[in-house]
């Protein structure tokens, strides 16, 4: 028995020494089984050669005592514990950088992956004995690895030299970005799978009824697609769980939604909303002191080709809160009973707004399409353009109870284009008159018309107040082709006509003596002009004969707006008129050459556009003590040439309070403000614009301190 006992001890000693040696000299080969397991297996194999197993699983021989067995077992356990200690220090790694640091630092490590996505953006060169332990939700993608002394179980390196842990799904194929669901539980699980793995993806919903109360933002863009005609969401609520720049975008396609509360950026395409009440950015607006952080920014919500129907709601279909912008395009509203379609709750910030384009309203019993309470510049935050109504809609604003409500149905009414007509005729040799009218024969003035003579180079002209312009200096057989492209008010039209202006020898009627030579035809040309008020710009007119010769010292009359002048052409056959002093708008200039003994008369219409100038509005930062009785904020207004603008009304808005002041002789407006609490305020100075100048705004920071 002593001999066997000694043999067992020798085997154990050899195994311990072999384990230590293996730990020091382990090569780049991947070892699946731990060293201590090898040692225990070796002992058990040696014992089994001369022993049998009792009920406890320990090897027993006829000459072995129970006490000896216990001593042997304790020795093996001691050896196993020592080997467990050799596996290394337990550490965590929540991202790729931490994992790389732990793998490349000295000393053995047992590294637990306590994160989810590990973005492999660098190569790991293992310099220690490392055991990496993952979870079912830990993924490492595209990892270049050089393994050295790496200890783990299972296959670690695939054929592309990519880390792979078959035992725990640490590495391998990226989770699918497309998921199909059939019920609410599957929908929630699919959403959580995408956000937990930080994967942008698409969730396809089969026909059925769904409810999703807490759709949180986690920096992942997700699209929800209804696969049938009966995908109904009885409640859909998106929420913000942390203050961050709103980059996440959710997209909803082909869904029917009954009730919704949206906070994250969202796009809705071909969705139906049945008897729905929809809150926009309510969750953001309810966060306290948000305007004091850099994250007080607008969240955007778009609705394209959506329908809203069968609603009977006390207030509005949409309620848009602060930090919300909603844009509805090509949407239909049918069978709606509500106070308004969209209402605003609370203040606006600069990027907020309510916008409806090309929408259709039928069977709607509402006081207004949009309701924006408060004394605000509605045009700055709202547009309702080119919509169709089955009721009489105007651009008027209906104010109720001292700005408690401001109802409006349109900011720009849809214009239905009517047919246009073109007449190409001649009552004088060598002269063709083009007349452009609408379907009621009313002239279309100021229209740009293209034409060619005998298929030559394309030319343009502008119709006058009578809807006409002339082409002169024509000879021989002539074909005139005319093209008008139309606009939002008039449909396009084309036309052609042919004339014969062949010259025949003239006589005096009594003999063959030739008659006096005929006058030479003339032509006026003037390109259209676009000018800015107060910035030098001229309308230049050129007079030539039918052969292209410039005509000098000829009188030309020009009428445009309040300007009426008769000028002589210079050596280049030109006259010019400054138009930058006209009131900004679009004009049709009438230009005429009356003719003389040698030349025929000619006329022309030219388009002149004068735009408003941009003024310069400035306001400097102001700092006050909270106890100061008088707090004044100033702003200066100058024109586009730097000259002060006097007696002009400016406004300053701070929070909900609006102050008004007029500029003095130096162009300075002074606002006396009431700010009784310390803090930093942002005010907006606004010039509403005039007939000469565009509107302008300027932000000003106001600090009130102790």
Image (cartoon, rainbow, N blue to C red):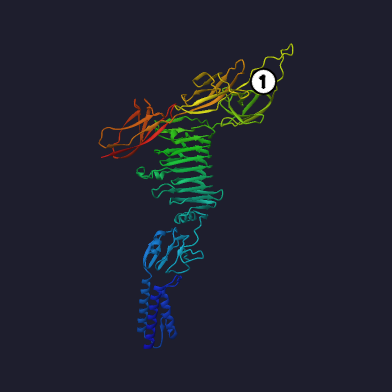
The residue identified by callout 1 is 429
The quarter of the displayed image where residue 32 is located: bottom left
Q: Nearer the viewer, residue 687 or 639?
A: 639
Picture layout, residue 218 above or below residue 639: below
The quarter of the displayed image where residue 545 is located: top right
Instruction: Classify residue 98 as left or right of residue 267.
Output: left
Picture layout, residue 383 above or below residue 203: above
Q: Quadrant of the C terminus?
A: top left
Q: Position of residue 436 (x, y in %)?
A: 61, 26
Instruction: Classify residue 509 as left or right of residue 34.
Output: right
Q: Nearer the viewer, residue 314 or 443?
A: 443
Residue positioned most to the front: 571
Picture layout, residue 161 above or below residue 465: below
Q: Secondary structure at mark 1?
A: loop
Mark 1 crowd level (few <14, some 14–19, many ≥20, 10 Å Cα): some
The residue that appears at 25% across and 35% down in the rendered structure is 628
């Amino acid at each position: 028995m002593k001999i066997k006992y000694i043999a067992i001890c020798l085997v154990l000693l050899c195994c311990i020494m072999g384990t230590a040696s293996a730990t020091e000299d382990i090569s780049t080969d991947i070892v699946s089984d731990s060293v201590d397991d090898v040692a225990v297996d070796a002992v058990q194999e040696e014992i089994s050669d001369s022993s049998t197993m009792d009920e406890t699983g320990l090897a027993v021989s006829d000459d072995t005592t129970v006490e000896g067995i216990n001593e042997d077992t304790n020795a093996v356990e001691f050896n196993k514990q020592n080997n467990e200690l050799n596996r290394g220090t337990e550490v965590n790694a929540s991202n790729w950088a931490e994992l790389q640091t732990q793998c490349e630092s000295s000393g053995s490590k047992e590294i637990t992956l306590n994160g989810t996505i590990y973005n492999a953006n660098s190569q790991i060169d293992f310099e220690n004995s490392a055991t990496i332990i993952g979870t079912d939700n830990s993924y490492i993608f595209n990892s270049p690895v050089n393994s050295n002394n790496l200890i783990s179980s299972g296959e670690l390196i695939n054929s592309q030299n990519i880390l792979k842990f078959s035992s725990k799904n640490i590495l391998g194929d990226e989770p699918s970005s497309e998921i199909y669901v059939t019920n609410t539980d599957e929908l929630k699980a699919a959403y959580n799978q995408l956000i937990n793995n930080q994967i942008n993806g698409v969730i396809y919903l089969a026909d059925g009824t769904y409810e999703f109360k807490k759709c949180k933002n986690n920096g992942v863009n997700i699209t929800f697609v209804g696969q049938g005609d009966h995908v109904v969401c009885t409640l859909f609520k998106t929420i913000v769980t942390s203050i961050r720049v709103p980059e996440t975008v959710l997209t909803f396609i082909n869904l029917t939604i009954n009730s919704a509360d949206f906070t994250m950026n969202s796009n809705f395409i071909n969705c139906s909303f049945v008897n729905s009440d929809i809150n926009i950015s309510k969750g953001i607006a309810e966060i306290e002191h948000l305007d004091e952080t850099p994250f007080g920014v607008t969240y955007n919500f778009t609705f394209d080709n959506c329908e809203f129907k069968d609603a009977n709601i006390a207030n509005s279909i949409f309620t848009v809160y602060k930090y919300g912008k909603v844009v509805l395009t090509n949407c239909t509203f049918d069978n709606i009973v509500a106070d308004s379609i969209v209402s605003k709750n609370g203040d606006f910030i600069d990027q907020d707004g309510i916008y409806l384009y090309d929408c259709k309203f039928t069977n709607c019993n509402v006081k207004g399409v949009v309701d924006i309470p408060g004394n605000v510049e509605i045009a700055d935050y709202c547009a309702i353009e080119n919509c169709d109504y089955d009721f009489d809609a105007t651009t008027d604003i209906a104010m109720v109870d001292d700005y408690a409500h401001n109802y409006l149905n349109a900011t720009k009414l849809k214009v239905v284009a009517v047919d246009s007509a073109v007449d190409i005729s001649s009552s004088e040799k060598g002269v063709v008159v083009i007349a452009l009218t609408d379907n009621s024969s009313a002239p279309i003035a100021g229209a740009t018309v293209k034409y060619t003579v005998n298929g030559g180079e394309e030319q343009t002209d502008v119709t006058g107040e009578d809807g006409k312009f002339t082409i002169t200096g024509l000879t021989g057989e002539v074909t005139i082709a005319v093209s008008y492209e139309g606009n939002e008010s008039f449909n396009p039209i084309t036309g052609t006509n042919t004339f014969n202006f062949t010259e025949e020898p003239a006589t005096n009627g009594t003999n063959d003596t030739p008659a006096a030579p005929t006058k030479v035809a003339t032509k006026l040309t003037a390109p259209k002009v676009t000018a800015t008020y107060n910035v030098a710009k001229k309308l230049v007119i050129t007079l030539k004969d039918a052969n292209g010769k410039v005509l000098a010292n000829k009188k030309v009359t020009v009428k445009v707006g309040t300007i009426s002048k008769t000028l002589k052409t210079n050596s280049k056959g030109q006259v010019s008129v400054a138009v930058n002093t006209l009131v900004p708008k679009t004009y049709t200039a009438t230009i005429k050459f009356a003719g003389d003994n040698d030349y025929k008369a000619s006329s022309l219409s030219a388009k002149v556009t004068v735009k408003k100038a941009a003024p310069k509005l400035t306001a400097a930062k102001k700092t006050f003590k909270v106890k100061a009785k008088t707090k004044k904020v100033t702003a200066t207004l100058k024109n586009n040439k730097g000259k002060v603008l006097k007696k002009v009304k400016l406004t300053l808005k701070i929070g909900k309070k609006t102050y008004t002041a007029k500029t003095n002789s130096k162009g300075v407006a002074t606002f006396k403000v009431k700010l009784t609490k310390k803090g930093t305020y942002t005010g907006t100075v606004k010039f509403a614009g005039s007939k000469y100048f565009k509107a302008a705004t300027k932000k000003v920071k106001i600090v009130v301190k102790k």
